[in-house]
Image: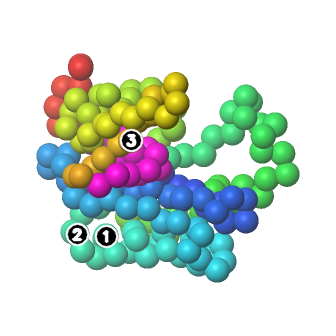
Amino acid sequence: MILAIDPSGNFNEGKGITGWTLLSEDNGAIVKFGAIDASTCLTAEEHWTNHINLIKGITEEYDSVYVVIEDFILYASKASSQINSRFETVKLIGIIQLYCWTEKIPLHFQTAVSVKRRWKNFLLEKKGFIEIKKYNKGKKTYEMCYINGYKVNDHVIDSLRHGVHFYYFQTKKEDTND
C-alpha cells in the first residue's frame, strides 16, 4: 500500500489541513482518502499525534505500507512570506520521519513542484483517479474535484498527486508517457 500525505502541521499559524490518500501498490487504485484538520484539535501536539495515529492505523491494517510525503523546501521566492514563521509543518514532517524510522516504515520524500507539474488535475481525471466538475461564479470558472463521488479539497488532491507519482515512478508499474 502507498500512504501519501500532503502535510500541514500548522496549528497556531492558520489551522492547517493535511490531505492523505491510500493507494494499492498492485494497481494504483484509491483505497481510502481523507483529511486531518487542525481546527478540530486543542493543541498542535494533538494535531500532530493524529498524523501518527493515521500512519499507525494504516500500518496495522495492511502488511506492507510505504509512506510518501511532501518534503518541505523553502524556495527563495517564498522565503519572505515565511519571516517569523515557527515552521510548524517542518516540525510535523520531522515527527513523521522519526516515527517511520523507529517503526521501520519505508518513507519517501517528494517535492511539491515535481508532482504538481506532472500530475495536473486533467491528467488525474484522464487516468480515472478523480472527476472534475466545473462551475461559474461571476465571470470566473472554478473546478471541484471528486473521488468516488465525494468532493475533496486541494490537500487531498495534492496527496493523491504524491501517491500517483510514487506509484508510477517508484513502483514502475506501467509506462507513463501520456
User: Residue type at mark 3?
Assistant: Met
Indicate the quadrant containing the C terminus: top left, top right, bottom left or bottom right: top left
Up/down of 8 relative to 170, above or below: below
| Front tag of 2 and 3 | 3
Disc 2 to disc 1: CB gap under 8 Å: yes
Instruction: Give left or right: position of 5 versus 123.
Output: right
Q: Which span of residues is magenta-colored?
A: 150-169
The residue positioned 84% from the left and 45% from the top of the image is 83
Q: Residues within 10 Å of mark 2 (few under 14, many from 20)?
A: few
| Kind of element beneath mark 1 | helix
Viewer-closest of 2 and 124: 124
Q: What colour scheme was applied to this rendering of the protein?
A: rainbow
Instruction: Locate residue 122: give its quadrant.
Output: top left
Q: CA distance from mark 2 to mark 1?
A: 6 Å
Q: Residues within 10 Å of mark 3 (few under 14, many from 20)?
A: some
| Front tag of 1 and 3 | 3
Indicate the quadrant containing the N terminus: top left, top right, bottom left or bottom right: bottom left
The residue positioned 52% from the left and 30% from the top of the image is 138
User: Residue type at mark 1?
Assistant: Ile
Where does label 1 land, which residue?
Answer: 58
Task: Check residue 62 in the rendering and tell me which mark sits there, or answer none.
Answer: 2
Q: CA distance from mark 1 to mark 3?
A: 27 Å
Viewer-closest of 64 and 125: 125
User: Residue type at mark 2?
Assistant: Tyr
**Would you say residue 114 is visible in this rendering?**
no
Where does label 3 land, which residue?
Answer: 144
Can you give x and y, in whole percent of width and height, for residue 130 in the image?
27, 41
**Would you say residue 90 is visible in this rendering?**
yes
